[in-house]
Amino acid sequence: MADSPADVPAYPHATATRRTAADHHLLRRRMQQPSPHPDAGPVSADVDTGNTAAGVRLRTPSPSRTLIATLALLAVGVLFLATAVAPGADARPGPSRSWSPAAKTETVRILGIGEFSGALDRPVGFQGELRDGSGNVRPAGGGAHLAATIGKLRDQADNSLLLATGDAIGGTTPEAALLDDRPTVQFFNRLGVDGVGVGKRELEKGGTHLRSLVTPGCRTDEDCRTDPPLPPFHGATFPFLATNAAPAPDAAPTFPYSVHRVGEVRVGVVALTPPRTGDDDAMQLSDPMRALDEAVEALRFLGVETIVGLVHAHPVHGNLDPGACPEELGDLDVTRDLNPAVDALIVGASGGPATCRFLDAENDERMVVAPASHGRSVTVVDLAVDPATGDVVRPLTAAFNQTVNLDIAPDADTVEFIRQAKAAAAPAGRKVLGTAATEIPRAMNAHGESPLADVIADGQLAAARDRGADLALSNPDSLRTDLPAGPLDYATLHTVQPYGDRLYLVTLTGEELHRAFDHFADDIGDNGPAVSANVRYTVDTRRPAGSRVTELHVDGEPVDPAREYTVVANEFLTSPEFGGSPLASLDTRREADLTDIEALIRYVSQEGPIHAPEPGRVRVLR
């Protein structure tokens, strides 16, 4: 995919797209060609169904597209009536129509990206690595290699559709964070992404932000340009999908489903967004399963029988082998109870890659796949479709997870695009956020205590106190360099802590907390995790592994085994991908709605000049 387009020609994605291998080849050749109408502002569709994605510049539709657009308008009535009159508990579509082994099938390739999180550059550390079935760790990911991998996977198929699960946006890389996710959207435009689900990060950033990614305020190339220049940003050329979003006048510009012409097959796409606590200006979310049933009714009214689902899930497994199927994925409510008309399900943010085949409610096989986060793998589902009926012949459907390896040539145009994005973000990256009174080293002392890791822990506790945190744990190994003395800007802070890990809150008993400290004592740094200033603990290295933490105090009091404590820690310490972390296995784990870099920025900005903490939080006996 070395010649992907800078601005993919616009298609009315929320209604239908028709793409073959030849189409994608043509799109890739148009990489640097200017739009035929550079002054045309984004189109905002005001029809009830949302059959045209806001922000998409429309071409004159073909008769077949016009027909599908008309049918989509009719579907709104179905969807509206389905919303007004609740279906019965057993109101599910019937099983697929019969298929004869003699019938010809057409292969429709579905490509899936999961929880991309703005990872234009390959992240450092575990977010930029993936293990194979033999347990070997290899580097994986990065926008340029992801583009090249998708190009190869497309070239292997006559017809394909590229989808992304929720949490596509976010600040893993500085250019994505500092330019308000516009480079991520532009990258997805260049890839030819056909639809993106809405996840927690999209919800956290709110409806106004999502609207700016679909319908930017600028109107002309000059207004939409960044200095130093990136290609002008005209908004997403793909729809954001949230099937269970309740319609409202000020809601985020999302759609309950989309229909795409892929070869001779029409494919419907639905996307479930998990409810979250607290008020949200982006959208109000309804019951996911009921909303999905209603969307399926509308799609089947349109004659669409091939349906693919996207879902954003909480991490549920620690599998790291892209070819394996973790049992925990089959235990998810959405996997078990999903409408049987959905032929394949792509799960994002599940805790790692997965390739599964589960039975649905009608005892029919369904592919359930999970791509690795941050662009480390691409899921591939080859649907075998009977073109006469549109039904998927599930026993003939195949799936696999393709690791985004670095042993192929990166897409040269994406390399150049990322260089431009970094240059465009550089001025904002140099804005001073605070100061450090002295240099704060990351190196550990004889007791395994890192002054810089202590600062990170203090910042995370300060940011999460109002979310119920009692103490903080920090991973010294996540720090890449010392914190320099003097003015501190975003670029400096990101260099110190480049992972962009989300922070999580985990509530556990004092007994469980003590066991967690014992687990971490030999695995992080020399002797144990960094802790916030209100924690003191002792490690006796002479004792057997698993019982080396002999004292543990929080707020000056010994930890009470029966009392509950809430810990804030970064994604690495709470992830299933980190060697069986005890914090990952607890069902009280929840997101703090912050990343580690956001917590550090707040701390640096609000606490005045930062000083190196006095040592003494950890005591080691040898």
Image (cartoon, rainbow, N blue to C red):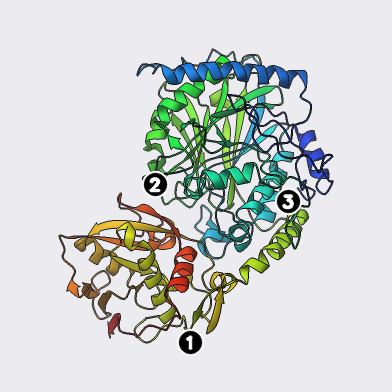
For image coordinates 27% across by 74% down, the residue present is 535
Give the label, 3 or 2, closer to the camera: 3
Q: Counting residues from the N terminus, which is met first, the one under dot 3 or under dot 1?
A: 3
Numbered mark located on residue 438 in the image: 1
Residue identified by numbered label 3 = 224
Residue 214 in the image: state x and y as whole percent. 63, 42
Mark 3 to mark 2 CA distance (whole Å):
41 Å
Residue identified by numbered label 2 = 316
Give the label, 3 or 1, closer to the camera: 3
Residue 127 in the image: state x and y as whole percent. 53, 59
Mark 2 to mark 1 CA distance (whole Å):
42 Å
Dot 3 amino acid type: Cys
Using the image as rendered, state which of residue 346 and residue 277 is in the foreground: 277
**Which element carries disc 1, helix, strand or loop?**
loop
Q: Could you tell whether 154 is left or right of 311 in the image?
A: right
Dot 2 amino acid type: Val
Using the image as rendered, state which of residue 126 and residue 436 is in the foreground: 436
**Which element carries disc 3, helix, strand or loop?**
loop
Q: Could you tell whether 133 is left or right of 179 in the image?
A: left
Using the image as rendered, state which of residue 271 and residue 309 is in the foreground: 271
Mark 3 to mark 1 CA distance (whole Å):
41 Å
Asked if labels 1 and 3 touch by Cβ distance under 8 angstroms, the answer is no
Residue 87 in the image: state x and y as whole percent. 39, 17
Q: Based on the displayed image, in which of its 4 quarters is residue 456 positioned?
A: bottom left
Up the image or down, 301 lies above or below 327; here it is above
**Which element carries disc 2, helix, strand or loop?**
loop
Q: Counting residues from the N terminus, which is met first, the one under dot 3 or under dot 2?
A: 3
